[in-house]
Amino acid sequence: MAKKFFIKTYGCQMNVHDSEYMAALLKGMGYIPTTSKEEADIILLNTCTVRKKPEQKAYSFLGRLKYQKRHRPLIIGVGGCLAQQQGELLLKRMPHIDFVFGTHQIYRLPEIISKLNKKGKVCETNFSYQLEPPKGVIPTFNKFRAYITIMQGCNNFCTYCIVPYVRGREVSRRSESILEEAKRLLDMGVKEIILLGQNVNSYGKDRREEISFAELIRRVGNLPKLRRLRFLTSHPKDLTLDLIKTFKEVGTLCEQIHLPVQCGSNRILKKMNRRYSREDYLKKIEMLRKVCPEIAITTDIIVGFPGETEKDFKQTISLLQEVSFDDIFAFKYSDRPPAKAVGFKEKIGEEIKAERLAAVHEVQAPITKAKNREKVGQRLEVLLDDYSKRGEMGLSGRTRCNRVVNVRAEASLLGHLVEVEIDEALSHSLRGRIIKVLD
């Protein structure tokens, strides 16, 4: 009987894509996936430490596995940013864990597992900067929408951020390899590709012979069979006019960008080491909307950064009102050792941070709802790539501007691009009815 594996993932799309690779590698070893950790012979936890909450969730999940380990044979492995940061300390803190592997060791997963019987517990957390995936390994949880990692790491060292310490410095993949991977995915029936990196805008800067990110967008975007292209995540300081122009030039590039601003106060932006001003950011928003008037713009907000005064916070609120983002992801600041801000004084109390977070959501919620209501009555292109999480609906997908749409539809339409007339706008999704199939 084949052995089974279960993977739990915390964090962003980068982690989701890393988990896709883990799953593909385990399948190559003869394991089969299960949705029940109680049935699994091997459990992998892919962790995140960008914020405190996912780290706490990871420790809680690992703690619950201790009981299972006592009562049946079970291999437990921990990967991702927490594994990279803690290494051997994680094995000492939780002795029921069998192995720990860092952010650069994912492709060595089969080799690491094979070491367990010979060496007992294993910890592999070296930075290898090996970005090229093993040949023949195709990572995708979704048959119609796929991620491609184009670079690893970050050079920015924002004072609140742990990413450069757990993902390393920026290293770009060869564009030829990226294009080859994209072609393979398209031949498999994938219709939408998302290019991933901690800072995709700086792609190629570490390789003199490489093309720019804007040129990579053009080359991937013009591949036959591709219907949609997206990218994550952008740093505002590296968003060039050439890249902005691709939203007009490349027909497959979706009208959507995630552009984290973090704060509306120039004083706090400087303390964060973001290397742009509020005015710089607003100019880039203006350019984006001039080139692509229908573009949907989302952002990240951090409240309660050390030293953030009420005046600083009100500037964040005014920025939300001025830009009118389609949606935001807002978080309370938390210390992330060894990031520089850990040593900053004037820490903000949890009660004030909670109040400010609530205020941010209170301002943004009606803006997002209004943006969604604007879509009612419109006919939008939707890629149906999943089953609806709303029981009464059949399938779900996303518009080109990345809004979730639920429709009543048979499973036979899964993977198709359809035209949907929007009937209802909810807080974070839309509902509609299919008018026609587009492919």
Image (spheres, rainbow, N blue to C red):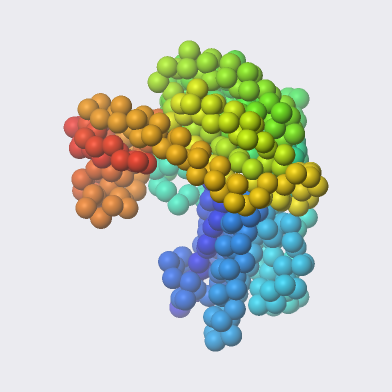
Give the left or right position of residue 202, taking residue 354 as reference. right
Give the left or right position of residue 284, taking residue 228 as reference. right
In the picture as drawn, the residue positioned furthest to the bottom comes out as 71
Q: Quadrant of the N terminus?
A: bottom left
- Depth order, front residue of 350/174: 350
Point out residue 302 in the picture as x, y percentages from the top left corner.
61, 40
Point out residue 5 in the picture as x, y percentages from the top left corner.
51, 68
Query: Residue, x 77% and y 67% (percent of image)?
Result: 88
Residue 431 visible in image: yes
Point out residue 81 in the picture as x, y percentages from the top left corner.
67, 54
Q: Quadrant of residue 434?
A: top left
Query: Residue, x 56% and y 75% (percent of image)?
Result: 65
- Determine whether 416 is above or below 40 in the image: above
In the picture as drawn, the residue positioned furthest to the top comes out as 290
- Depth order, front residue of 256/355: 355
Q: How many circles with numbers are drawn on the protein?
A: 0
Q: In which quarter of the image is the C terminus?
A: top left
- Depth order, front residue of 142/356: 356
Query: Residue, x 79% and y 44% (percent of image)?
Result: 344
- Depth order, front residue of 175/374: 374
Query: Residue, x 59% and y 51% (percent of image)?
Result: 351
Residue 261 visible in image: no
- Determine whether 26 is above or below 169 in the image: below
Point out residue 15 in the picture as x, y percentages from the top left corner.
58, 50
Q: In which quarter of the image is residue 416?
A: top left
Give the left or right position of residue 26, taking residue 82 as reference. left
